[in-house]
Every structure is written in C-alpha cells, then in structure tokens.
Image (cartoon, coloured by chain):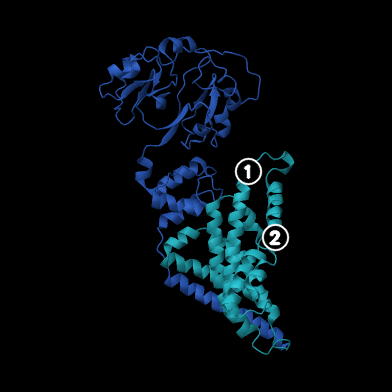
Chain colours: A cyan, B blue
Amino acid sequence: MALKLASIFFTMILVDNYVLSKFLGICPFLGVSKKLDSAVGMSLAVTFVMVMATAATWPIYRLLLVPAGMEGTDRDMGYLQTIVFILIIAILVQLLENFLKKFIPALYKALGVYLPLITTNCTILGVTILNLDNGYNFVESIVCAAGAGIGFLVAMVLFSGVRRKVEQAVTPVCFKGLPITLVAAAMTSLSFMGFGGIVEAIFRV
Amino acid sequence: MDMIIMAIVLVTVIGLIGAVILVAASIFMYVPVDERVEKITGVLAGANCGACGCAGCADYAKSIVEDGNAINKCTPGGAQTVAAISEIMGVEASAAASLKAVVACSGTCEKTSKRYEFEGIHSCQAVKGLYGGDGMCKYGCLGYGDCVRACPFDAIHIVDGIAKVDRTKCVGCGACAAVCPNAVISIVPEHKRKPVVLCQNKDKGGDTRKACTAGCIGCMKCAKACPKEAITVENNLARIDQDKCVGCQLCVKECPVGVIHVPAND
C-alpha cells in the first residue's frame, strides 16, 4: 500500500508532471514564474487547493453523481462532473479564503492574491477529474493531488531559474519576451521526458 | 426526461448549498475591515496596474491604512486621487509635509557651456556614456530629458538647458530621480522657508568656477553664517541638513554665487 502511494506520489512529480508532461496550468506557469518567491507562493496555494478540492470532489462524485454499481445505467450522471466540479472548486476556494482570513491570517497573507487566482486554474480541475479516471480510491486520490501540487512547485521553481538565465541572455529581437520563454518552456518540458519509466524502475510496481 | 430534471435539480441544489455555506461563512468568519480601506479602494484608479508596488488597488489601499504607505503612489489616478485619499485619511495625512522633486543644478545655458557637440540619441543616459556628458560640469543636469519622459504627471520639463519641476503638478513619486544618470534630482519634503543647495559639483572651487558661474565653490560662507550648524561642506560642496534647518535663510543671503535657493519659492 505504502509502496503504491509512494509510486503515485513520485509519478505525479516526475513522470506525469501536470505542467511539463500533461501541459495543464500553462497560464500560471508562464505568468507567475518570473520571480522565485511568487512562483513558490503560487505553487503552495495550488498544492493546498488541489488537496482540498480532491477531498471534496471525490466523495461527491462517488456518492452523488455515480453511486457504486450505477456505472453505465440511467443513474450514471458522470457527464455532470465538469460543471459540478467547477462549482465545488469555486465554492471551496472562496470558503478557504474566508477561513484563512479569519483563523490563519499569516497563511492568508503568504498566499495573498494567488488564492482567488487559482479558482479557475485548469490543473485543479484536471487533478480531480483524472483521479477519478484513473480509478484511485480516496487516499490514493489525496496522495495523487499532493504529488501533482509538488510537481507543479518543482516545475515552477525550475522554470523560474531557467527564466532568469534567459532574461540575462542576449536574445535576437524577434525572440524577445514570450517567444523565447515558450522555447525555454518546451526545452524544460523535453528534459522532463527523460524521467519516463524511472518511477516504475525504482518502486518495481 | 427524468434524468434531465434530476441533473438540473442536482446542480441547482449543490449551487444553493454552496451559496448558503458561503453566506454563512462570510457572516461567521467576518473580519472587521477598516472602512477607510474600502473608501480608498473606491477612489483609486482601479486599473490594478501595480505601479504602486502592491498587488492591485485593494492591496495598496490596505497598505495605506495599515502600514502607512505613501498616498501618492497611484500613478494612473494622478493628483485627484491623492487629494481624495488625503481627505479620507483625515487631516494628519494632508498636513504632513508633501514631497517634491528638487533638481539640484543651477547650470542654465548662460551659466555654463558645453564641452562638445553631442549628436547621438537624445537621452541623458546616452550622453553620460560619452566622456561623462557634454557639459562643462560633469555633475550637473545633462538636459536631455530622461526625467521628462519618466514623469507620469508631466511635472518636469527642460527649461533653459536644465530640468525644472512644476511644483503644482509634482507628487514626489521619484520616477525622475530614479532615471537621472547624474542623480541630480532628489525628493525633498516641501517647505516654504528651508533652502537647498542647487548644485552637485564636487570639484575644487577654481575648477567649479571655470565650469559654471552658478556652481557651489565650497567657500564655507554659508556654513559660518548658519546659526544652527545645519550646513556642512564636504568634497567642496555645501549640504543643508533639512532637519536642523530652521529656515532663517541667512545662507541664501551669504552665498557669493547665489546657488542656495528655497525651491518652493522659485
């Protein structure tokens, strides 16, 4: 069990990295990776919300939308998952913001403007939906979400370093700004392809 | 048909439950907010441009009220916004000394001259890179208007070869001071009586005289005249400590080159 959880966790970080392999959440990846501290802040907020969102959506899907044994029947309302999950994530983030403001002002201040920003982040929705597609149980889903968040953090931190180098480099005028950033992102993503199979080899699962 | 109704009911019910939870949460977890924060957010430009250095207008409003941030950082809002905020923040804010840019150079066209003709890019930064500038004085205003282009309030202009601050428009944001390659511009608290030495020349008196007839020659007359010992002469350049100065203006009368002025009265 522990082995499987560890395998899921590290697969999410290295092999199935949401940003660099699944190409979700490219907007914050390009937008907030300019500075290291804001990249870390955003990633921590994303991790936090990913875990909370998974914890909230998994039971709702399994209990309300598609109760056990109802797959494929008339009662299967799995097609509603996108709209329902968006609704739930939006509510959850808002609730979380209120909660943090009241009880953990330090964390609220640290996450700052990134918390409301990630309401509409596609990685959050992606994690919740892919967890169900993969048939993970509740604990596995939570671990998977945490891994996805840490993977996001790794990608953001790595890329903010790459970006600093790019900004100091002399680039041709036609490549200045976003083009060279996208090229750099493509190369970072390409380098992550090298991790393919590494987790299976380590954990032998 | 049943399934359509059920789907609609399900989504509606989830939405309603969410709404109830959020309303309840906003009541139970209400954090009292200083009402001035909301008022200031209202009068700010609302562009969320980040020119003030905060993460959006609401954040800036909060930092004004809670951390005592300066009220004149809203670039798009301009002078109107500053006035509106100072009204909301009460008398203490408007009574506080307002900051204005001061150009510490008196080298107008008739007082100094050029060492060479510069025909490059029309920018102080560019001319500074060529033998330290084209003026006889290497410390003074270059007069190519980097500050004019940097000013978001159209409050600084090149007049008679040097930058001149329009004191009614200046909000003391420091944008001009940041771009000046000679660091001629400083942000000084506005005072009706306290004078400033409008020169940056650190050469010896004789050399300064050759470069500019309005330059500070470091003769020490002002320092001797000052009853409060607010004036010090370092590197052949007089400086007035604004905290010690009482505004008697004896130094203004004493200065042989007439380089000490009260910026507010110019």
Q: What residue type is labelled 1?
A: Glu
Label 2's element? helix
Residue B266 location in percent, x, y? 43, 23
Q: Classify B25 as above or below A121.
A: below
Q: Position of residue A52 (x, y in %)?
A: 54, 72
Question: Badge 1 is on which residue?
Answer: A167
Viewed as shown, does residue A137 lie left or right of A21?
left
Q: In which quarter of the image is the N terminus of chain A?
A: bottom right
- Residue B208 place in picture, x, y as percent: 45, 13
Q: For residue B126, what is the image quadrant?
A: top right
Q: Residues within 10 Å of mark 1 (few under 14, many from 20)?
A: some
Badge 2 sits on which subunit?
A
Is B151 left, or right, of B92 in this rendering? right
Discs 1 and 2 lie in a common subunit: yes
Q: Which residue is drawn at 73% across and 87% down?
A: A72
Please tell me which residue is depicted at 51% across the width and 34% down the height of the picture. B178
SS label for mark 1: helix
Give the numbered dot on residue A194: 2
- In this rendered view, identify the residue nearer to me: B42 or B175: B175
Can residue A16 be seen here? The reply is: no
The image quarter in which residue B215 lies: top left
